[in-house]
Image (cartoon, coloured by chain):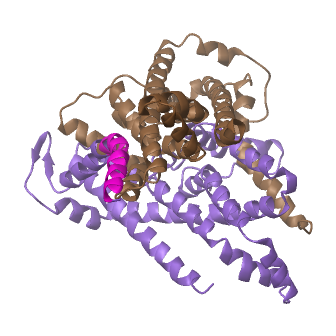
Chain colours: A brown, B purple
Amino acid sequence: MTRPSKYLKIFAYTYLVFLYAPALLLPIFSFNSSQIIAFPLTGFTLHWFETLLYQSTLHEALRNSLIVAVSSSILATILGILASRSATRYDFTGKQISLTFILAPLVLPEIIVGVALLIVLIQLGLSLNLWSVVLGHTLLIMPFSILIMNSAFNNLDISLEEASMDLGENQFGTFYRIILPLVFPGIMASLLIGFTLSLDEFIIAFFLTGTDTTLPVYIWAQFRFPKKLPTTMALGTLLLVTSFLLLSLSEYFRRRAVNSRSSVL
Amino acid sequence: MIFEIRTETKKGWRLLSIPFVFSLLLLAAPLTMMFLLSFWTQDYLVLDKTFTLNNYIEAATQPVYQLLFQRSLIISLSVTFFTVLLAYPMAYFISFYGGERKALWLFLITIPFWTSYLLRMFLWKVILGYNGVFNSLLLWLEMITEPVTFILYNANAVVIALTHGWAPFAILPIFVSLEKIDRSLLEASRDLGDGPFHQFFRVILPLSAPGVVGAALIIFIPTVGDYITPKLVGGTDGLMIANMIQVQFSKANNAPLAAALSASSLMVVAFISIVFVLFNKKYLRRY
């Protein structure tokens, strides 16, 4: 292959800088001692991280977010396992269209999903609370779970299943003792990605949360106070590090899920 | 044989029915409800359930909604255009010159997008603001004497922030479609006398078109309904339809109109997407 032209190379690196610019500001300004987010930098401080320790509303929002993220990622993964097991193992009428429908939230504008869910909850006279957010997030995460689980199930060898049945296991035993351990890395990847998506999700939470705020809704409220900007930046830095760790872990599991077949046989 | 097909269908549906019913309850039912509501009227708290098209007529004729629809479409189409335009050479660079380090490049590109969307869009506000990072940096370096304002609280700011925010959604599909191109086709076109220019426009671009079309749709559809970005960096001149939907819902207390605006945007987006896909199919058949 010929070498890239000079311009293409320069473009690629410039574009990379553009892609990194906002994310790099988070750590820079969360350690900067000035209350104003601007250059030149004034000095190093850990003060903004320290203030995070004393904000009880933040802690409550974090607790709410964790409840929502854990519940919705587990729910979405269970539903995702059911759907993709069905999709990868069986061939039947109506499969494609119903799967397309289940995957629709991937491309629907979130505001539409949020508005529609809010209308139903209000019309049914249900109160808005963390559980309505859990349901909304499960709906949004489920397509991701299905896509991840699809690649895990696709790598399963059907003969392993048949062997287990021949050796006297019933369907449940086969699923529990053979299939589940083999797709376990996929399940972990789905849980972690679901957790991260839910932790970051704003619109649905903003529409469906009642008085209990989640972390992004809390952050949204903080944007109104210029004085609290550096603290918000510090919080953002912590969230960036968390997302980075969670997604690296899920990537590790996802690769194991894809490679599981070769390692078993 | 028939029995086997039946059990296969039965087994398949037994598993799929649970997630399917979940989606029916949480997606189909709410969307249906939204459409129903859009034909009703609300007077303060009392809902009048007689069928009317007034909400749609209002959405289509009131200048403020027309303006917001237009602006949302223009912003979203510009974002789609610029994102794909910038992402293509990047994807091309990685696919053709990435060599051993393709995976590393893709990894490098996705890392910045592991920050939450909300925070990234907020950071653009911090960057583009009057006393923001960009202006303060240029002032400090003495490249400008007055803060520049054309990138602040307007549609331009929304386009810049969204073009950044959706970059990986363009780079990845285009990269995948470029990877699929059989490299021997390039040799063939070179042997048959195509220069780099002709080779790109007659071989590479048409063969990577599915990735471009996919990227365009993935970006266009959700950005029309973006709420966060216009609210944070758009000022009043950069507000989009999603912001109006939210206002109608909460402050204006007119849920039926909000529903009609949502339904209208959904239909407009669906229409443009379908036309775009059909147009591309027709055009690409030549290859």
Residue nearer the viewer, B90 or B152 = B90
Is residue B244 toward the left or the right of residue A37 in the image?
Answer: left
Counting every numbered tag in the picture gives 0
Q: Position of residue B189 (x, y in %)?
A: 81, 84
Q: Residue furthest front?
A: A167
Is residue A132 toward the left or the right of residue B120 in the image?
Answer: left
Magenta residue span: B2-23
Q: Position of residue A197 (x, y in %)?
A: 53, 36
What is the chief secondary structure element of the magenta stretch? helix
Q: Residue furthest bottom?
A: B193
Residue at coordinates 31% horizontally, 42% vertically from top-left? B26
The answer to whether one can see residue B21 in this image is: yes
Is residue A196 toward the left or the right of residue B259 in the image?
Answer: right
Q: Position of residue A183 (x, y in %)?
A: 57, 35
Q: Does residue A248 sit above or below B144 in this rendering?
A: above
Q: Does residue A11 sit above or below A209 in this rendering?
A: below
Indicate the quadrant containing the C terminus of chain B: top left, top right, bottom left or bottom right. Answer: bottom right
Indicate the quadrant containing the N terminus of chain B: top left, top right, bottom left or bottom right. Answer: bottom left
Residue at coordinates 84% horizontally, 45% vertically from top-left? B141
Res A172 → quadrant? top left
